[in-house]
Amino acid sequence: MEDRIKELVSRTQGMVSNIEAASYEQLAEFVEWRGKVISSIIESDQQGQIALKNYHSTIEEIMSYDTQLLDRMNHFKLEASDELIKLQTSKKQRSGYDAAYSVDSVFYDEKK
């Protein structure tokens, strides 16, 4: 289990060091993996296989990166929200031009 904790620290530090270059997919994959690892560590602690209190400083180190990860996820969330607003606006504008008009009258321009 100690290997998994070391891997968690290593991969967390790696993600945080390259967080500006990380794509949404990479960040989502990392967070999902991280959740699974943390769940397995907690389960091992509950079964008495390891004692998490021995890894208190390591856990605090891992948690210290949470704000940076959350900030980046919020950045992606805001980007997506902005794009959705742009799409909705363009859809409204386009619907004004694409409306089906019925022709009730016809005008002729006669040159004299």
Image: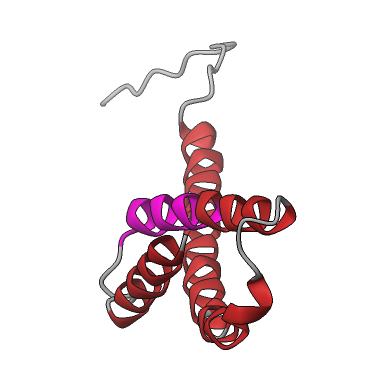
Indicate yes or no whether the magenta region holds residue 1: no
Identify the residue at horizontal 54%, vertical 35% (top origin): 96
Identify the residue at horizontal 62%, vertical 83% (top origin): 56
- Front residue of 31/4: it is 4
The location of residue 2, given as percent across then percent down, is 44, 67
Q: Which residues are magenta?
A: 23-35
Q: Residue furthest right?
A: 46
Indicate yes or no whether the magenta region holds residue 25: yes
Q: Quadrant of the C terminus?
A: top left
Identify the residue at horizontal 61%, vertical 63% (top origin): 50
- Front residue of 9/82: it is 9
Q: Is residue 8 above or below residue 35?
A: below
Q: Is residue 104 above or below residue 61?
A: above
Q: How is the image coloured?
A: secondary structure
Q: Is residue 72 above or below residue 96?
A: below
Residue 37 falls left or right of residue 20: right
Total labels: the figure holds 0
Q: Is residue 4 above or below residue 63?
A: above
Q: Residue furthest front?
A: 49
- Front residue of 108/71: it is 71
The location of residue 6, given as percent across then percent down, is 39, 71
- Front residue of 95/72: it is 72
Identify the residue at horizontal 40%, vertical 59% (top origin): 27
- Our reading of the magenta stretch's main secondary structure is helix
Residue 64 lies in quadrant: bottom right
The location of residue 10, given as percent across then percent down, is 33, 74
The location of residue 77, given as percent across then percent down, is 54, 61
